Image (spheres, coloured by chain):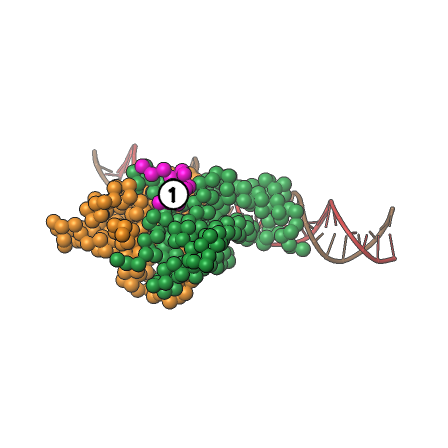
Chain colours: A green, B orange, C red, D brown
Amino acid sequence: MHGRANLTAMRLMDACEHLLCEAEALEDLTARRIAIEANATPSAIAYHFGSQEELVAAVAERVYRRLNAERLRLLQKAVDRRAPHPPNLEEVIAALVGPSIRWSLDPTSSYPVLSHFTSMAKTHREQAPHYRRIIDNVEHHRAFIPHLKRIAPWLDEVDIGWRLNCALGIRSQVTRSRSRTEVLTNYRMNLDDPEIVITRMVEVIAPMFRRIA
Amino acid sequence: MHGRANLTAMRLMDACEHLLCEAEALEDLTARRIAIEANATPSAIAYHFGSQEELVAAVAERVYRRLNAERLRLLQKAVDRRAPHPPNLEEVIAALVGPSIRWSLDPTSSYPVLSHFTSMAKTHREQAPHYRRIIDNVEHHRAFIPHLKRIAPWLDEVDIGWRLNCALGIRSQVTRSRSRTEVLTNYRMNLDDPEIVITRMVEVIAPMFRRIA
DNA sequence: ACGGAATTCGAATGCCGTTCGAAACCGGAA
DNA sequence: TTCCGGTTTCGAACGGCATTCGAATTCCGT
């Protein structure tokens, strides 16, 4: 059947997700280890997913869907709270970057899957196009554009998208280059409390969308 | 001697740098290929550098040094132009992000070495601390802090460092997630002209350092 | 020209992802 | 119950990888 609804296929995905979360380095993730954790053999990976890389892609897509659902839920909440007026800028930004920040600081979350996955796209040539399709799936990001446009109507859509992209870059820097962030802020910012970090990020991102003086 | 001044050691570094620039994926970089390109054998890598990973680290450090020299040169130029007054904010930001942008768009530059190197830190467990020391070497970034503090004296050093870190995140997003940037801006921004991109980045980063209205 | 250190080499080792044919399993038809 | 086709699992390969190590070679001061 080569399907993914199979029981062992599910166990392989769970094992892969778990190992990706525990692993401090990508070299700790091997087909044999995944198979052992799932009570299966390496061949099962090839049978059900085609290759180890495709298994990882399937797992990453699953985690991405959870994160995006959370993001869009918060966006909707921000919109509903002020409807029919434009939503609050700070709340929209918090909806954009908040889930990533909270997940990255929650040791029980599957956020490591995503950060490992993006660096995997640079490692494997064959699956790179497929990987990039998942990483660059910005449909859920584009959902923010119309609402930001209502907040900052003096910016055109390109400007909005560009600022959105910059906000995502800041998000990545904070979630993925923690040690660099620590050093630059002289270890004097509390980077363990997600709400503090989100507030600090909003403080920096919001001015991008304000009318210039 | 196990030194790095050796001729073959130099040839190995050059070959490694060249392959890292050409390679579209990290799996294209193998010890055997490096050795062949340098007219040597894989064992030579172990002899001169200890391992392939350490060779890559040495190469990355060399490229980093070039980039940082360029950055600090531009910073100094910005400072000198306005001395004894504080330098121009836009010019300082351009000195910070400009070299990365120009290199990343210049096909003859060694910028791919750096982007590959950072994703390598996530792949290898053993060398991760050593890799991170190179990546997190922010001494050259800290050189920007006192000048930014003169420009925005109402921000304390933590605020400055935090905004510097955010600016670097935007830089990484633009240089390393080009396709995402393209999609979010509807392919309507010219991302091939470094000067246009730098102007757009300054436009977004500068407000972070302006006094809130 | 010699001798010891520095360097290069090539074979061997163990791990990796993947392939493939054979075995096992399963559910419906006889 | 017996049989049978398709589905799934398994284990033994295969080639490629980085690395190790002892032997061979080169280099250089004496």
**Which residues make up the magenta segment?**
A188-200
Picture quadrant of residue A34:
top right
- Front-lying residue, A6 or A97: A97
Q: Is residue B189 left or right of residue A26?
A: left
Picture quadrant of residue A178:
top left
- The reply to whether residue B60 is visible in this rendering is no
Instruction: Give the amino acid type for the residue marked by disc 1 in the picture.
Output: Val
Let me know if residue A204 is in the magenta part. no
Residue B206: x %, y % from top left: 27, 54
The residue at the point 43 percent across, 61 percent down is A146
The residue at the point 42 percent across, 55 percent down is A87
Q: Is residue B209 left or right of residue A161?
A: left
- The reply to whether residue A198 is visible in this rendering is yes
Q: Badge 1 sits on which subunit? A: A
Q: Which residue is mark 1?
A: A197
- Front-lying residue, A59 or B149: B149
- Front-lying residue, B76 or D28: B76
